[in-house]
Structure formats: C-alpha cells, structure tokens
Image: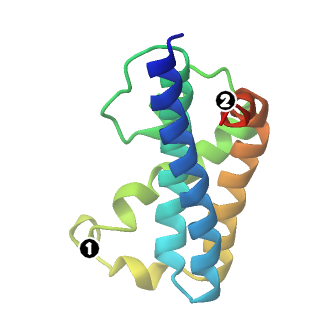
C-alpha cells in the first residue's frame, strides 16, 4: 500500500470514528433517528477506510451489507451490519414509507443501532488501529 492509500484510509476511518461518537451523543438530545443514521454512516465509512487501506478503490455505494461482505465478518457481527442497513434511507427520507421517519425511532432503537455499530468497530479494531497510530 502506498502512502496515498494510507492517507485516504486514515481520513475515512477518522471520520467513521467521529460519526460513531456523534451517533452516541445524539441519543442524549433525543435525536434518535440521527443516531441511527450516523451509526450506519460510521460503519459505511469504516468499511470504505478498510477497503482504501488495502489499496483498492473506494466504492460509491451506501450498501453496508455489500461493503462488508468482503471483510469476512463472523455471522454475529454481520447481523449487526444487517440491522443497520435500512437506516441509511429510512431515517432520512419520508417518502419511502407511510410514516414520518423520526417518529419511528425511540431511545431503545437508537441505542440498539449505536451498540451494533460499536460492536462492528470493536471487532475490526485491530484492522484500523495501527493506521491511526502512525499519525
């Protein structure tokens, strides 16, 4: 991997970590839909960072189930990915269902989403920590 690949991967992963932190903080202000959305975003950016770290082009996809499918995740971690998959669109777009998205999220659901994202990050920690240590 080149230094340019490292730099791109580092940016994705740092933003992913920030998004995960912001997801957690949104629970305290009752931004439950935003917490779910940011949990998805954090995982998406983590996966893209890990792809960049391998020197591969970063896909322009938001489908974390597809992005994560090449990371050889154990079933229990991949289930966390599946839990977060729908939140990218559902939490943002009121025209994809019969309801107002933010009204469908509560503290319990938001905490589940954040915890799912945290489990994914914890599982993949060894894959990205060394990259961030080099700063």
Given the current orientation, which residue lies at the most extreme bottom position?
29
Relative to 95, say whether 30 is above or below: below
Q: Which residue is under mark 2?
A: 131
User: In what quadrant of the picture does the N terminus appear?
Assistant: top right
Residue 109 in sight here: no
Question: Alpha carbon of mark 2 to alpha carbon of mark 1: how far?
Answer: 38 Å
View extreme (left): residue: 95
Look at the numbered discs 2 and 1 and tell me whether their residues touch, using CB distance below 8 Å: no
Foreground residue among 134 and 100:
134
Crowd band around label 1 with a 10 angstrom C-alpha radius: few (<14), some (14–19), many (20+): few
- Is 78 located above or below residue 84 in the figure? above
Q: Give whichever of discs 2 and 1 has the lower sequence position.
A: 1
User: Which residue shows up at 49% across the image and 43% down it?
Assistant: 44
Q: Count the marks: how many?
A: 2
Residue 14 visible here = yes
> Residue 94: which numbered mark, if any?
1
Foreground of the two, 13 or 82: 13
Nearest the viewer among 124 and 80 is 124
Name the spot of residue 122 as percent of width and height, x first: 78, 44
Q: Residue at x 73, y 32 (%)?
A: 75
Q: Residue at x 64, y 86 (%)?
A: 28
| SS class, disc 1 | helix
Tell me if 62 is positioned left or right of 126 in this view: left
* Image quarter hosting the C terminus: top right
Query: Among all residues in the image, which is located at the extreme front?
Result: 135
The quarter of the displayed image where residue 115 is located: bottom right
Q: Could you tell me residue 34's position as x and y percent?
A: 47, 73
């Amino acid at each position: 991997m080149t230094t340019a690949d490292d730099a791109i991967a580092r940016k994705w992963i740092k933003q992913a970590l920030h998004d995960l932190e912001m997801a957690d903080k949104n629970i305290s202000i009752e931004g439950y839909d935003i917490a779910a959305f940011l949990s998805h975003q954090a995982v998406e950016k983590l996966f893209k960072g890990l792809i960049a770290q391998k020197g591969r082009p970063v896909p322009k996809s938001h489908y974390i189930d597809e992005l994560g499918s090449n990371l050889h995740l154990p079933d229990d971690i991949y289930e966390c990915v599946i839990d977060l998959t729908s939140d990218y669109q559902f939490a943002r777009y009121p025209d994809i269902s019969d309801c107002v998205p933010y009204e469908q999220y509560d503290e319990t659901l938001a905490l589940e989403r954040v915890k799912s994202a945290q489990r994914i990050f914890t599982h993949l920690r060894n894959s990205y920590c060394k990259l961030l240590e080099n700063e």
